[in-house]
């Protein structure tokens, strides 16, 4: 979220719905809590001016007699005690208010969002998870403790100036005019400039991060094409403007801080000078003097600094108001027409099987694209108890019909009737309970297998537990899922959903989804491309399950598919194109017409010799449907072992981390030296201030010689002004120097980190700790935290050390007996500062992390909103969410009550220390061990420096983050890959010594992924690819096809055996030189942020021209399309190619592969995710590209490789058959079985 500028912040708080954020406080108890918080916050601003007055009276009569001192100290202790209880009260009340507001908003947001229709999610696209996490956290910060601090600051400001004017209006007025306007200007202008440069830096850094994120997410592509250097340079190019704006931000911050200190010390100079004039002119009562000057200066300057806090406070409230607009926009959104919460509408009879469905003259356009009509006046009938298939190319409107039947949207015109009732007249909740949906991408929710299946019974609440279990087991059997579920580690109690779903294959997830769909015995079953992403074996198992599911008596089944082999047995097949019905009939009727369906069939047709059905059943029956999920303990043992063997696991000392950080910043060593010099000066300022302060107080208290008072006060006031100039120069210099060093350090570390990551072995990325999200966090966040070791943290440490050393030394030189005793109290002040920061940090961290589990649940539901709506799971989600936030809410309330005791104590204890210091100092002055001058030098020398040392405490969380970040980053930098060691080894380039042919051999190759040590992937794989051959690798999932491609690219090394290219073992070759001969086109066409030309050019490290790019694009059949784009070849592809369709992305990826003119072209499922039309375009491009070079293709659509020169059939990590398509069919073996599963005739 963009930072609000200061002038805008004020208006934003009062012109937006900020005060509506308190809407969840509905009960009298909640409103009373808010009222108490406000009153206590205002009351908390009063004790400090009273304490200032007490200090003044002590100073004025110093050293007072014992009775007077005892009275003053008792007053001070009493006020400090009251301050403790008031502070605890307002902090606790505001903390509870914040929790209640955030909880109420979270519940309302989810309840509203989960009941919205699909139009809302498409058109408005609200990120519900973001609203429930980041936005509610921002709101909570703006309606909790910071409100109390803000109100306290206002009350203190008013009370301080009221006290000042009552003591001496003239001095207070002079200080008001001298301090308030400059402070206001500094805060307003400085905050505006900081926000401007911070936003610019953030925007530019985001561009660089998109490059890094794309590269890490497609690391195989980066390594395959040797694109590391070009992408790293592109990342560095975008970092340049980010660094420049970051430097300006640092300089502005340094100037702002320097100016604030200049105004403060200059105001001290003016105040004491004017105070002396007032005293000598009789402006004060004879009983008043230095103490009253001190009180006025102390209160007015301290209150003036409060103005500087208004900016951050108002900015927090403005951000909360902005976040509140987003959140309240959801809560106040008008109820949708398609309202799941509505109780209106007709409820159909309970036994309403045999539902006839009719679409009559239906036209529809998605609300997000109202001009693009998807369905155009279509009429369809789905008869009760029949299976109807809908086929056609992408964009023809097939899935749209499924969405309309489930009433995710309403029609633009026409009608849909269910058993004679218009669907809009039916009760929505009851209607959807009679339908079930199986989507192309099955959504499993976090929980067990049993939890996911029983979600299909959510709308049947009156079933007893025994009946639920019986139905779930029966549905699992009908879905062909029972056997593999029982082989899972905990059977039906195995955790799946979310990240857990990665334990299951696509077919297994799909079969669980089918079980969930049929467990409720739906009247209508809708199957939306349920097998499109599965291989032949997985598809066969799912089809068998669907055959059982659709055979239920009276059930109306609608299947949408683009693999026509899955719909041959349908009672009716509807062919659609461009939103219209082209043909209808069964398979035989449509084939006889030689129309649109016939053309689709021919596009997917296999040259089958027709193996027997019994052969197919045998082969499918032999497939092992078990899933191999290692036990948690074994996996943990293995991960620990792998990390100990393959990763650098070094404990870094703080000294070594700082040394390495400074080593990286070596080019900026003169700036570091300049910054450290500035810090030494700023640390010494407190020592100078103590001497000046002590002399001024003692001089103003001695009114025996007015001329001497004037001259000495003028001199030391001038010294205060000189100190203000020194402070301005020192703070500006140190802040600017370290700001520049930090930004340059971030750029260097980000660059080195990205290069190191992209050079690691592919196996390294299989660890959850090295996921793209974790690595991007390291690049984006850890580098920023680490920079503090050479910037703010290092500078603050130097400042505090110099300040403490100077203060302690000065105090012992001046009056060691006073210093020794007061010094014992210094750790208490330091500890109180640490405690205060610790509590505030923990509160903030709790706000950020306490509700992450609940947020994941809500995100899961919103991401799978189609499935949630289809299952009628809305109320279940709301109940689960309320349950998920209840415990963290209770824990937070408990922490607020207890934690704020320590927070209030840390704020009040300082005044108890001052009371002790005045008592001991007065006692020493009375007995003659020191003079008042000595005491007033020792007191600020020790206590001011102790308070300043609190800066180190405030940096404790930042230092911890910096240390952790530095350890993470340097651990990464020390990580060495085993495959790519940064050079081409001892192997001379192939072009120099060997005739390039492109022959590939696998000789008895055995291989196991390190992340799955108990599951061998290749078990003696041997095959040969002759130069110029087009060879296909086919087989079931897990057979080792893609693993063979990975080994040939040398993403991994074999465990035993050898992979040879042109007779040479690829392990003896330099990895980069080897990869220059190979190009890879994967199933997922990974494109990077940048132009089309940039993405294609990443395919080669040699020099190339624009003509080279256009030539390969023409070969891939995409040149004309690119030229039709707004900027031609310079058109941006968007993030991961988001501006292009799947087929277009795949052809750009093919052009990228061809521009390097490889001897070997690898195609890994290059067309599996495309529809028939896009697949045909890509197949033509591949046929043109494969001429004259060795080509190895992995595929599970056999139609795409039936013309290959040689086909190897892999199963269980070895070759089980090989030959041409015709030869393999004649064998009537594994390949013939796979062919039968996909055949269309």
Image (tube, rainbow, N blue to C red):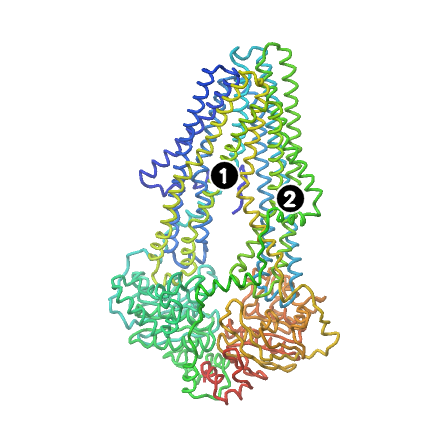
Residue 632: give its label: none
Q: Secondary structure at mark 1?
A: helix
In terms of secondary structure, where does tag 2 sit?
helix
Which percent across, then down, holds residue 1150?
61, 71
Relative height, residue 737 to residue 152 (above, below): below
| Label number found at residue 837 | 1
Q: Is residue 801 above or below residue 1069?
A: above
| Circle 1 Cα neighbour tier, 10 Å, few/some/many (<14 / 14–19 / ≥20) | many
Q: CA distance from mark 1 to mark 2?
A: 28 Å
Q: Nearer the viewer, residue 50 or 199?
A: 50
Task: Residue at the far right: name it.
Answer: 992
Q: Earlier in the sequence, mark 1 or mark 2?
A: 2
Position of 1197 with respect to 463 (left or right) is right
Report the quarter where the C terminus lies: bottom left
Which residue is labeled 2 in the image?
Answer: 247
Q: Quadrant of residue 269?
A: top right
x then y, percent, for residue 556: 33, 73
Mark 2 packing: few (<14 Cα in 10 Å), some, or many (20+)?
many
């Amino acid at each position: 979220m963009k930072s609000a500028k200061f002038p805008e912040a004020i208006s934003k708080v009062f012109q937006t719905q900020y005060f509506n954020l308190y809407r969840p406080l509905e009960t009298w108890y909640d409103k009373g809590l808010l009222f108490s918080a406000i009153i206590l916050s205002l009351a908390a601003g009063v004790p400090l001016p009273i304490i200032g007055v007490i200090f003044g009276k002590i100073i004025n009569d110093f050293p007072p007699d014992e009775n007077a001192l005892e009275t003053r100290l008792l007053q001070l202790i009493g006020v400090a005690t009251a301050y403790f209880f008031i502070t605890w009260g307002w902090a606790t009340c505001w903390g509870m208010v914040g929790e209640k507001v955030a909880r109420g908003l979270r519940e309302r947001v989810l309840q509203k969002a989960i009941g919205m229709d699909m139009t809302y999610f498409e058109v408005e696209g609200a990120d519900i998870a973001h609203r429930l996490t980041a936005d509610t956290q921002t709101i909570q910060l703006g309606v909790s403790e910071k409100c109390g601090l803000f109100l306290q600051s206002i009350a203190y400001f008013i009370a301080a100036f009221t006290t000042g004017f009552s003591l001496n209006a003239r001095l207070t007025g002079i200080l008001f005019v001298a301090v308030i306007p400059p402070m206001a200007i500094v805060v307003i202008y400085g905050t505006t400039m900081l926000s401007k440069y911070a936003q610019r830096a953030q925007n530019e850094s985001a561009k660089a991060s998109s490059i890094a994120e794309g590269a890490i997410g497609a690391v195989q592509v980066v390594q395959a094409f040797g694109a590391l250097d070009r992408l790293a340079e592109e990342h560095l190019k975008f970092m340049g403007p980010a660094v420049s704006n970051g430097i300006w931000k640092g300089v502005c911050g340094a100037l702002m801080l320097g100016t604030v200190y200049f105004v403060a010390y200059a105001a001290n100079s003016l105040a004491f000078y004017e105070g002396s004039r007032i005293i000598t002119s009789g402006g004060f009562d004879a009983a008043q003097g230095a103490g009253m000057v001190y009180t006025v200066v102390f209160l007015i300057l301290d209150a003036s600094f409060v103005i500087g806090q208004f900016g951050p406070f108002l900015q927090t409230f403005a951000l909360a108001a902005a976040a509140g607009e987003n959140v309240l926009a959801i809560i106040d959104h008008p109820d949708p027409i398609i309202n799941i919460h509505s109780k209106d509408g007709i409820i159909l009879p309970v036994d309403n099987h045999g539902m006839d469905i009719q679409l009559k003259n239906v036209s529809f356009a998605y609300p997000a694209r109202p001009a693009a009509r998807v369905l155009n006046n279509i009429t369809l009938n789905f008869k009760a108890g029949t299976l109807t298939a809908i086929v056609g190319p992408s964009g023809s409107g097939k899935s749209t019909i499924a969405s309309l039947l489930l009433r995710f949207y309403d029609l633009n015109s026409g009608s849909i009737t269910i058993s004679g009732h218009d669907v809009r007249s039916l009760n929505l909740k009851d209607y959807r309970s009679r339908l079930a949906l199986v989507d192309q991408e099955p959504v499993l929710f976090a929980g067990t297998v049993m939890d996911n299946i029983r979600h299909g019974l959510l709308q049947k609440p009156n079933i007893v537990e025994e009946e639920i279990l019986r139905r779930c087991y029966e549905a699992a059997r009908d879905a062909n899922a029972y056997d593999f579920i029982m082989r899972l580690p905990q059977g039906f109690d195995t955790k799946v959903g979310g990240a857990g779903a990665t334990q299951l294959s696509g077919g297994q997830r799909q079969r669980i989804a089918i079980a969930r769909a049929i467990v409720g015995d739906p009247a209508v079953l809708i199957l939306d491309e349920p097998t499109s992403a599965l291989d032949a074996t997985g598809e066969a198992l799912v089809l068998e399950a669907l055959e059982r599911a659709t055979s239920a008596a009276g059930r109306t089944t609608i299947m949408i598919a683009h693999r026509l082999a899955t719909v041959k047995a349908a009672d009716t097949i509807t062919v659609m194109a461009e939103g219209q019905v082209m043909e209808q009939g069964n398979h035989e009727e449509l084939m006889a017409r030689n129309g649109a369906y016939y053309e689709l069939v021919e596009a997917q047709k296999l040259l089958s010799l027709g193996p027997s059905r019994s052969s197919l059943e045998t082969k499918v029956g032999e497939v092992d449907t078990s899933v191999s999920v290692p036990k948690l303990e074994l996996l943990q043992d293995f991960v620990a072992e792998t990390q100990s063997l393959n990763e650098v696991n070094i404990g870094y000392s703080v000294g070594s981390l700082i040394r390495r950080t400074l080593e990286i910043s070596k080019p900026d060593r003169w700036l570091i030296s300049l910054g450290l010099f500035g810090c030494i000066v700023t640390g010494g300022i407190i020592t100078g201030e103590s001497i000046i302060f002590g002399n001024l107080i003692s001089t103003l208290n001695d009114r025996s010689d007015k001329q001497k008072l004037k001259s000495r006060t003028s001199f030391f006031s001038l010294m205060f002004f000189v100190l203000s100039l020194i402070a301005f120069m020192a703070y500006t210099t140190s802040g600017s120097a370290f700001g520049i060093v930090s930004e340059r350090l971030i750029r260097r570390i980000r660059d080195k980190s990205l290069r190191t990551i992209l050079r690691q072995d592919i196996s390294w990325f299989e660890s959850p700790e090295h996921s793209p999200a974790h690595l991007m966090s390291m690049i984006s966040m850890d580098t920023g935290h680490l920079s503090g070791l050479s910037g703010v943290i290092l500078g603050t440490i130097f400042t505090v050390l110099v300040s403490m050393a100077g203060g302690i030394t000065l105090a012992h030189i001046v009056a060691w007996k006073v210093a020794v005793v007061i010094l014992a109290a210094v750790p208490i002040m330091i500890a109180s500062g640490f405690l205060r920061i610790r509590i505030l940090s923990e509160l903030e961290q709790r706000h950020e992390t306490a509700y992450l589990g609940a947020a994941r649940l809500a995100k899961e539901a919103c991401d799978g909103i189609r499935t949630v709506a289809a299952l009628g799971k809305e109320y279940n989600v709301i109940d689960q969410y309320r349950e998920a936030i209840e415990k963290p809410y209770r824990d937070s309330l408990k922490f607020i009550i207890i934690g704020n005791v320590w927070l209030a104590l840390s704020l009040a204890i300082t005044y108890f220390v001052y009371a002790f210091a005045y008592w001991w100092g007065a006692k020493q002055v009375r007995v003659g061990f020191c003079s008042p001058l000595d005491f007033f030098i020792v007191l600020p020398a020790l206590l001011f420096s102790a308070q300043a040392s609190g800066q180190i405490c405030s940096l404790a969380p930042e230092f911890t983050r910096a240390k952790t970040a530095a350890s993470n980053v340097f651990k990464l930098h020390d990580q060495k890959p085993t495959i790519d060691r940064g050079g081409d080894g001892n192997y001379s380039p192939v072009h120099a010594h060997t005739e390039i042919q492109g022959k590939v051999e696998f000789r008895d190759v055995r291989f196991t992924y390190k992340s799955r040590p108990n599951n061998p992937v290749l078990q003696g794989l041997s095959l040969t690819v002759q130069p110029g051959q087009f060879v296909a690798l086919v087989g079931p999932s897990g057979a080792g096809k893609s693993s063979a491609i990975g080994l040939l690219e040398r993403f991994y090394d074999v465990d035993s055996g050898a992979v040879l290219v042109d007779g040479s073992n690829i392990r003896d070759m330099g990895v980069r030189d080897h990869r220059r001969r190979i190009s890879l086109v994967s199933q997922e066409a990974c494109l990077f942020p940048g132009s089309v030309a940039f993405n294609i050019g990443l395919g080669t490290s040699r020099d190339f021209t624009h003509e080279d790019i256009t030539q390969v694009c023409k070969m891939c059949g995409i040149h004309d399309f690119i030229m039709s784009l707004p900027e031609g070849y310079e058109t941006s592809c968007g993030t991961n190619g988001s501006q292009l369709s799947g087929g277009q992305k795949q052809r750009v990826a093919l052009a990228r592969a061809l521009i390097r003119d490889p001897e070997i072209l690898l195609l890994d499922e290059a067309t599996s995710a495309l529809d028939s039309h896009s697949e045909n375009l890509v197949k033509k491009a591949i046929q043109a590209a494969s001429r004259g070079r060795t080509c190895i293709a992995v595929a599970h659509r056999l139609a795409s490789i039936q013309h290959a020169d040689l086909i190897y059939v892999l199963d269980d990590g070895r070759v089980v058959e090989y030959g041409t398509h015709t030869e393999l069919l004649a064998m009537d073996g594994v390949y013939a079985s796979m062919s039968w599963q996909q055949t269309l005739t």
